Image (cartoon, rainbow, N blue to C red):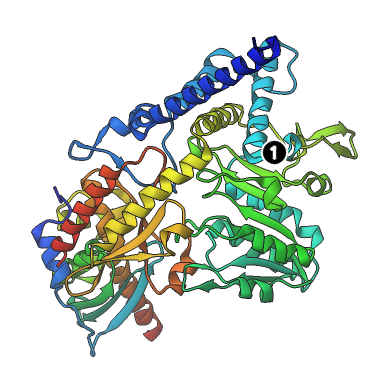
Amino acid sequence: MPSDKKVQGSLNFHKKMAFKICVVAQMDQLSIENIRKDFPILSRKVRNNVPLIYLDNAATTQKPKQVVDAIADYYLRYNANVHRGIHALSEEASEKYEEAHLKVAKFLNAKFQEVIFTKNTTEGLNIVAHGMYDRLERDDEIVVTRMEHHSNIVPFQVLARKTGAKLKFIELDKFETLNLESAEKVITDRTKLVSIPHMSNVLGTINPVKDIVDIAKAHGSLVLLDGAQSVPHLPVDFADLGVDFLAFSGHKMLAPMGIGGLIGKEEVLEDFEPLLYGGEMIKYVDYERATWNDLPWKFEAGTPNVGGGIGLGVAIDYLSNIGMERVHKMERELTKYTMERFSELDFVQIYGPPSEYRGGVVSFNVFNDDGELIHPHDVSTILDEHGIAIRAGHHCAQPLMRAMSIPATNRVSFYIYNNYEEVDKTVEVLKEVKALFS
Amino acid sequence: MNNIYRENILEHYKNPLNHEEMADATVDFEDTNPVCGDEIHFWVKIDDDGKIKRATFKGRGCAISQASASMLTETVEGMTVEEVEELGADEIRELLGVPLSPIRLKCALLGLKVLQGALLKYKGEQVNKR
């Protein structure tokens, strides 16, 4: 006879197993087709009554019912301002809004007080740029990369101009990946801030953040990570990466527009100057002076986007339910397939690194029989007539486009609901584009 | 399907009219659309009574911007400077005869913008001469 303890242990084991099997089954149900059911927009028709194929996810993603319902629920059931009213609705709203911060903190492995809600990545980057004003002296250095989005260049151009600091660039290898030797050279003891994108919105390259952090930290520099394209698509561990700041946008990860986050190390944020001053961010106010509120509220002046924050929290629930490892794997497989299919087309040129170095972004150009570039606007217009939404242009990266000597590119970018048929259809239309312009 | 790319637009794009530099032009002007990198350069010959004798262009960019410029060179021949200055989005839409979204309209209007820029430059030069 087994002892009671053993029976109990065995029962627990079986319970755990049953739970595991249940989880695996759940995962299988979360196939792409099941995910698609949560996005009503994906079953609508566009243009000449053709089904929508949405491949512009690096610009913004679609929203699942769960997120839209949560926002509607806030506005229809407990809309109130947060952190002030002593009444039921205000307490409920405050609780949900704070809970959303907690969800972001857990999702990115940061502390609650390190999570600042912003309107988007751009605002996060600007908070950091602004906070650097009184930390820079003439001839100090700010280091960014040659693959930057305008939002990670322009604030630092202005910062450099106003402080007399120098803006320096980490070079690229073959317009594919960051050149670490260049990083070693460019980052010096005068470098006060290194800002890099986690993943390029044009090339799709996922950058070796930890290598850059190692170099920057050896010189005592702060590191800002632009996570606009990475936080929605890969597991991102703020504490483990060792960066000082991480900025991202909610709308690129199922949440509404107008909500995003800046994660900052507590000890750095403590004596960092906020960008906005006003209500909510203060503790004690006199006619002459004021003291700042605790983190993270010190950086959230004025009435925040409560509904958006709640929506972001539910978007994170949705993604966590699938699992970010799985999100990354699904997208990587679809990207690999896309690059293979595009490579079959000898009139298509793909930019950026091989699929194992990139996320779900593929930039490319199409050429006619005479080898002339078919302008991306023409390519995307014809794709659009077949219901296929892609991005065409310079992707807010004009300097990179000029350095690559191309006027623009086409870009397909994926998310959890994109499937292989959509890629096949795109390939068929690209053949049509080539024929039409040859 | 392919509403925008009607035969006449593709024809103008593939075999543009008056697609050359003009050595004896009265005025020339060049501009770009930074959003898509399209470039157009116009040369205009204006006779003594202020009429466009000939317009030529060169450039690179999307089919809409290049076809629109090609059609313009034909349209403006014989028009006065003032008449060309009055052309706008409606006339360009009519000229192309295809539906244009707001973004594509910018492509379509680049040629006209450059041509009108050339005429503005011409008028400035006329004033300075006096």
Q: Chain of mark 1?
A: A
Q: Residue at x 28, y 54 (%)?
A: A380
Q: Amino acid at mark 1?
A: Val
Where is residue A389? Give x, y as percent: 31, 46
Where does the C terminus of chain A fall, quadrant-wise? bottom left
Residue reaching furthest to the bottom: B23
Q: Is residue B98 left or right of residue A419?
A: left
**Secondary structure of the residue carrying numbered label 1:** strand
Q: Residue at x 75, y 31 (%)?
A: A280
Where is residue A367? Give x, y as percent: 24, 68
Q: Is residue A95 left or right of residue B5?
A: right
Residue A218: quarter of image = bottom right
Q: Is residue A135 above or below residue B28?
A: above
Where is residue A107? Give x, y as percent: 62, 36
Q: Residue at x 47, y 40 (%)?
A: A326
Q: Is residue A54 above or below residue A199?
A: above
Mark 1 neighbour density, 10 Å: few (under 14) some (14–19) many (20 or more): many
* Res B36 visible: yes
Q: Which residue is mark 1?
A: A115
